[in-house]
Image: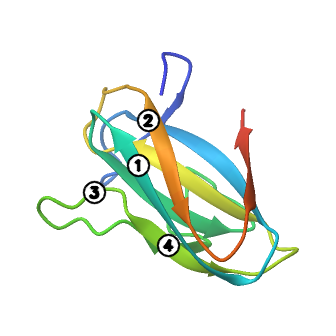
């Protein structure tokens, strides 16, 4: 997440949480899990069809486990020819940093960063 990433008030409508949106295209139906490698704490959300930062619960399929010491790991069952959106966001407001995604699943998937 760089200076040009978008922000939204993820927690109770407060704070500027940086986020990136990534479209996921599965080439085979199945369960996929996303994890990250980073120096900052991140959370992940998976949406079906669309993500609207004004309504973060709409179309939500899965989200990271927010328990102590756990971050980002999130997964869901994906179907071919369906649009899924992965939202990667910071756990603390006004934080930015680089991250790498680690993906486990039955086949390759295509990731496309969505810029607004």
- Please name the residue shown 54% across and 52% down the image: 87
What numbered label is drawn on residue 84?
Answer: none
Local packing at callout 3 (Cα closer than 10 Å; few below 14, some 14-19, many 20+) is: some
Contact flag, marks 4 and 1 (Cβ < 8 Å): no
Local packing at callout 2 (Cα closer than 10 Å; few below 14, some 14-19, many 20+) is: some
* Residue with the mark numbered 4: 75
Q: Mark 4 vs mark 1: which is more N-terminal?
A: 1
Q: Mark 2 vs mark 1: which is more N-terminal?
A: 1
Q: Residue furthest left?
A: 68
What numbered label is drawn on residue 36?
Answer: 1
- Please name the residue shown 49% across and 20% down the image: 2
Disc 1 to disc 3, C-alpha distance: 9 Å
Where residue 19 appears, as percent x and y from the top left, is: 49, 39
Q: Mark 1 vs mark 3: which is more N-terminal?
A: 1
* Residue with the mark numbered 2: 99
Q: Is residue 8 above or below residue 27?
A: above
Disc 4 to disc 1, C-alpha distance: 12 Å
Q: Secondary structure at mark 1?
A: strand
Q: Mark 4 vs mark 2: which is more N-terminal?
A: 4
Q: Residue furthest right?
A: 81
- Please name the residue shown 60% across and 73% down the image: 105
* Residue with the mark numbered 3: 71
């Amino acid at each position: 997440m760089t200076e040009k990433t978008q922000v939204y008030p993820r927690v109770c409508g407060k704070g500027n949480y940086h986020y990136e949106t990534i479209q996921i295209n599965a080439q085979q139906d199945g369960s996929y899990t996303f994890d990250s490698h980073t120096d900052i704490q991140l959370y992940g959300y998976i949406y079906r069809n669309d993500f609207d930062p004004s309504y973060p619960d709409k179309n939500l399929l899965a989200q990271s486990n927010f328990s102590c010491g756990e971050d980002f790991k999130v997964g869901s069952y994906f179907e071919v020819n369906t649009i899924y959106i992965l939202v990667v966001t910071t756990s603390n407001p006004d934080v930015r940093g680089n991250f790498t995604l680690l993906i486990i699943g039955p086949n390759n998937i295509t990731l496309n960063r969505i810029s607004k």
